[in-house]
Amino acid sequence: MGAIFDAIQSKLTSAFAPTRLEIHDDSDRHAGHAGAHPDGESHFNVLIESAAFEGAAKVARQRMVYHALADELAGRLHALSVKALAPGEG
C-alpha cells in the first residue's frame, strides 16, 4: 500500500479505534478525471465501524472522519467516500 493509504489507516485507527475498517483505493477508476493523480492514491472508499459514531447523525460522522484526515484532504487526496457506522448497524 502507499503513503496515503497508510496515513488513512493510521489516523482513523488512532482517532476512532474501529471494530471494522475497510479502505479501498479507487483511483484507477478515476484516471484522467479532475483531481486524479498520475501515481494514484487520490480517490478512496472507506467503511468504518466505531463506537465513536453512536448517536451521531450521518453527516456528523462524515465530518468526524474528514476532520481526522484534514491534512490528506488538503493535499493529494481528492475524493473520499465514507460509510461510517456504529457497532450493530448494517
Image (spheres, rainbow, N blue to C red):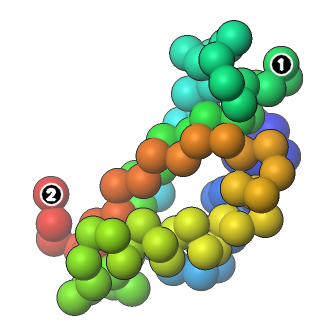
**Can see residue 49?**
no
Tell me if 54 is positioned left or right of 61 in this view.
left
Residue at image point 16% right, 66% down:
89
Reading the image, the residue beneath label 1 is 38
Q: Position of residue 26 (x, y in %)?
A: 56, 27
Q: What element carries label 1?
A: loop
User: Would you place residue 40 above or below residue 44 in this image?
Assistant: above
Contact (Cβ within 8 Å) of mark 2 with mark 1: no
**Can see residue 11?**
yes
Q: In which quarter of the image is residue 37?
A: top right
Residue at image point 58% right, 42% down:
79
Tell me if 16 is positioned left or right of 36 in this view.
left
Q: Which of 27 and 1 is in front in this view?
A: 27
Tell me if 59 is positioned left or right of 69 in this view.
left
Residue at image point 36% right, 77% down:
60
**Crowding near pointer 1: few (<14 within 10 Å), some, many (20+)?**
few
User: Would you place residue 7 above or below residue 19 in this image?
Assistant: above
The amino acid pointed to by label 2 is Gly
Q: Position of residue 78 (x, y in %)?
A: 67, 41
Tell me if 76 is positioned left or right of 44 in this view.
right
Residue 90, which numbered label?
2
Q: In which quarter of the image is the C terminus?
A: bottom left
- The answer to which of marks 2 and 1 sits earlier in the sequence is 1
Q: In which quarter of the image is residue 87?
A: bottom left
Q: Position of residue 77 (x, y in %)?
A: 71, 45
Q: Position of residue 12 (x, y in %)?
A: 59, 69
Residue furthest toward the front?
34
User: Would you place residue 29 above or below residue 72 in this image?
Assistant: above
The amino acid pointed to by label 1 is Pro
**Of discs 2 and 1, which sits in the foreground?**
1
Q: What element carries label 2?
A: loop
